[in-house]
Image (cartoon, grey):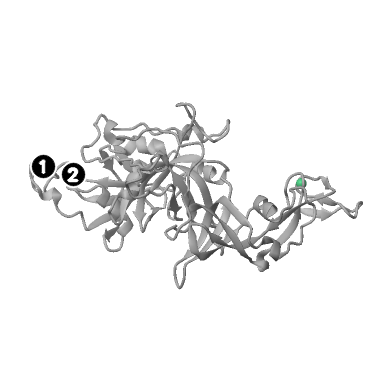
Amino acid sequence: MGLCVLVQDGYGMFSMVQLHPLPSEDPLHLYTRKWEGRTCVLRAIKVVQRVTRERWTRLFSLIDSLWPPVMPFKVLGENQSCQGDSRHKGPAPSFCYLLSGQEGSVEPVEGQPLSSLYLPPTEQTLRDILQCELNSHRCSFVATVIYKRTQSQSSDQSPGEVWLVVTDPSLQEEQQSDGPPCRRTLAVCVTTSCVLTSSVAKAISTPGTFRLSFRDAVREHGGILCVEQSVVQLRPLVSVCCPHTESTLGPGSLSLSQAKPLPQPLPQSQPNVLPQALPQHVTLDPLGPETPPNSLCTFSGVIVGVDEDTAYSWPVCSLCGSDRLEMAPQKPQAFLCVACDSLVDQPTMNMQLEVFMNCSTLRDFTVKVKLQQSTIMSVLNCAASGHEFPGYEVENVLGKEVGLLSAYVRVLTRKPALSIGLEEICL
Ligand SMILES: [Zn+2]
């Protein structure tokens, strides 16, 4: 699915018009500026399907977020809209139409003000979204991505879901001790049905934090999903020390021009959103029984076991870190790095080690943790320059205290018993 517009006529009927696939240089903001909130004439439109609420729940959750309308509708057979009539406060529509057309099919009427049917999205803070009691609803917000994880589908190389761990100043500010604690970060799942613009896709594949605006994401089952009708766009980073905005993308990046915030068509569309900066060090939630999968947490504890099947080490280039080493033909003890074309006398040993831990915040459960190299080194008491993998003794590792460390929650199952798999990360 590419570019779509949701339209509503004066009688209250919604239709989704499917246009063309988005070109790679994503001029999405241009379309937004041209069409959003404007009265448009639709020409050369084909009716594809009449769809119902039962079968198209996602589309109707978007329609519900625009309901009830702010103005009364026209009624068929009457020329004037029925002022004061309360019928528009009835239930939201149970069906709508899917239409298809070309870009030129949607033509804004020149000189018209923004339509009073138009309801711009309201950006909420993440704290407001987390505290909302509604079961499933659409929400819009701006947040900083502090960690991301792409799950490519195993069958082919096409990109799978992307998990983004986000936070904003409302989740990072000091929490009141009397109220219920609020989570510090939130996992956003960008499903494969959500089309990402090239600038967003580039930011996701580049190291570092960045800010995104999420529009019409779905809050559901304690998490946030980006689906077909959700729009994800880059926003400039707000730096800690100064109010000027900056971007994580380097100079010469074409994406910068598209990273600017959209001009807001209506001043009331962004109430109370303060461009506050995040603290320099983001606070994470401690690991606990309620920690959701695909989230971030901090943990500490004692090693009570080693998964010996997953423990191994391999040599990497001491200059560039690549594992593409070959035997050097002239020097039998040395390696040739294929990646940086250097002769490596003493390669660095990379290690993988997964341990079982008793964590201080989760007393009665065993947590499996995939440790990072630096932590493995400190657990094994070996200097970072160690050339040999120190054929570790399990007894030397057991009982070692580890932490406080940050981790990504890889696996979390609650049945038949709580089982947690963590992967240590470095933010
Ligand atoms: Zn190398």
Disc 1 residue: CB within 8 Å of ligand 1: no
Mark 1 and mark 2 in contact (Cβ < 8 Å)?
A: yes
The foreground one among 148 and 46 is 148
Vertically, is 415 above or below 322? Answer: below
Disc 2 residue: CB within 8 Å of ligand 1: no
Regarding residue 102, the answer to whether it shows in the image is no
The foreground one among 137 and 99 is 137
Give the label on residue 109, or none: none
What element does badge 2 sit on? loop
What element does badge 1 sit on? loop
Q: Quadrant of the C terminus?
A: top right
Q: Is residue 322 left or right of residue 5?
A: right
Q: Is residue 393 left or right of residue 273?
A: right
Q: CA distance from mark 2 to mark 1?
A: 9 Å
Find disc 1 in the rendering and name its residue. Answer: 81
The foreground one among 351 and 375 is 375
Figure label count:
2
For label 1, count other residues whose C-alpha is less than 10 Å away and answer few (under 14), some (14-19) or many (20+).
some
Which residue, as the protein is rendered here, is positioned at the far front?
399
The foreground one among 171 and 135 is 171
Q: Is residue 65 left or right of residue 10?
A: right
- Please identify the quarter of the rendering in which residue 103 is found: top left
Counting from the top left corner in percent of width and height, residue 111 is at: 25, 29
- Please identify the quarter of the rendering in which residue 73 is found: top left
Identified by mark 1, the residue type is Ser
- Please identify the quarter of the rendering in which residue 233 is found: top left
Which residue, as the protein is rendered here, is positioned at the far bottom?
416
Vertically, is 141 above or below 307? Answer: above
Find disc 2 in the rendering and name its residue. Answer: 10
Q: Counting residues from the N terminus, which is met first, the one under dot 2 or under dot 1?
A: 2
Identified by mark 2, the residue type is Gly
